[in-house]
Image (spheres, helix red, strand yellow):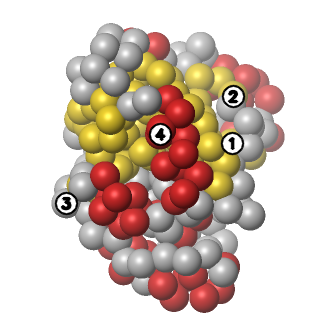
């Protein structure tokens, strides 16, 4: 089954919200709706998909601010991240005061753990737990096309911040070593901000990964 992906940077923080859908069924997931719900809805209409669920990689406001609004708009459930990020999702209104992004608390119907499977139409995504940026951070892998949605774990030329509450630098590097760098070089990934990259490119050139 082929996967399709549309990327929509949202809010002044330019977070890569994505619409991921099954080409066979045209059923879709909205991954990390960090705000600008009206723009996300416009994109859904343009690509002509049926939203089946909301997926969250982690609980920071730029990834989850519009999760509740989108889930209510399409009458779908929220899945992810890991339960260790529950406090972030409940405190989204407090995060909103700092960043100026409207948000309501988010209540996932399913917390995700390492090795779980997520289904979108006929697609099956593997869940990998990658703590460090936040304790409950997860990433989504689609093996047939070697595509990963990695949130704020790793970026082109960089890695996620660990100076925010509950961040842990050593834990993040361990997650990258064990969950990302174990993938083959030709795996492509969409990070939470900025351009896409490949595992091979980052293995060779990312200064934060040398020695891992």
Residue placed furthest toward the left? 109
Question: In this rendering, would 104 be left or right of 150?
Answer: left
Count all numbered tags in the image, as a single digit: 4
Compute the Cα span from label 1 to label 2. 8 Å
Compute the Cα span from label 4 to label 1. 26 Å
Name the mark on residue 155: 1
Q: Residues within 10 Å of mark 2 (few under 14, many from 20)?
A: some
Looking at the image, do the residues carrying marks 4 and 2 touch, with CB atoms under 8 Å apart? no
Q: Residues within 10 Å of mark 3 (few under 14, many from 20)?
A: few
Above/below status of 27 relative to 133: above
What residue sits right under mark 2 in the picture?
A: 197
What residue sits right under mark 4 in the picture?
A: 44
Q: Nearer the viewer, residue 166 or 103?
A: 103
Q: Residue at x 34, y 71 (%)?
A: 106
Q: Secondary structure at mark 2?
A: strand
Q: Residue at x 56, y 63 (%)?
A: 35
The disc, 4 or 1, on the residue closer to the chain's N-terminal end is: 4
Q: Secondary structure at mark 4?
A: helix
Query: Does the image show residue 173?
Result: no
**Residue 97, how many percent across, how many down?**
60, 88
Looking at the image, do the residues carrying marks 1 and 2 touch, with CB atoms under 8 Å apart? yes
Q: Secondary structure at mark 1?
A: strand
Q: Residues within 10 Å of mark 1 (few under 14, many from 20)?
A: many
Query: Does the image show residue 99?
Result: yes
**Residue 208, how many percent across, how many down?**
74, 45
Above/below status of 177 relative to 135: above
Where residue 102 sits, quadrant-wise, is bottom right
Please name which of the two marks, 4 or 1, marks the residue nearer to the observer: 4
């Amino acid at each position: 089954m082929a996967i399709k992906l549309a990327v929509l940077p949202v809010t002044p923080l330019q977070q890569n919200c994505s619409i991921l859908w099954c080409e066979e069924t045209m059923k879709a997931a909205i991954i990390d709706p960090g705000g600008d719900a009206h723009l996300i809805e416009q994109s859904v209409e343009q690509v002509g998909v049926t939203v089946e669920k909301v997926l969250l990689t982690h609980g920071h406001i730029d990834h989850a601010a519009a999760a509740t609004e989108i889930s209510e708009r399409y009458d779908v459930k929220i899945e992810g991240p890991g339960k260790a990020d529950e406090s972030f999702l409940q405190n989204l209104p407090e995060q909103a005061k700092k960043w100026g992004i409207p948000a309501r608390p988010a209540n996932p119907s399913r917390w995700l753990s390492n090795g779980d499977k997520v289904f979108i139409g006929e697609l099956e995504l593997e869940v990998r737990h990658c703590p460090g940026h936040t304790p409950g951070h997860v990433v989504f892998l689609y093996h047939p096309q070697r595509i990963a949605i990695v949130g704020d774990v790793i970026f082109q030329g960089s890695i996620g911040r660990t100076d925010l509450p509950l961040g842990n630098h050593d834990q993040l590097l361990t997650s990258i070593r064990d969950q990302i760098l174990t993938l083959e070089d030709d795996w492509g990934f969409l990070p939470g901000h900025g351009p896409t990259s490949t595992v091979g490119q980052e293995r060779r050139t990312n200064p934060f990964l040398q020695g891992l």
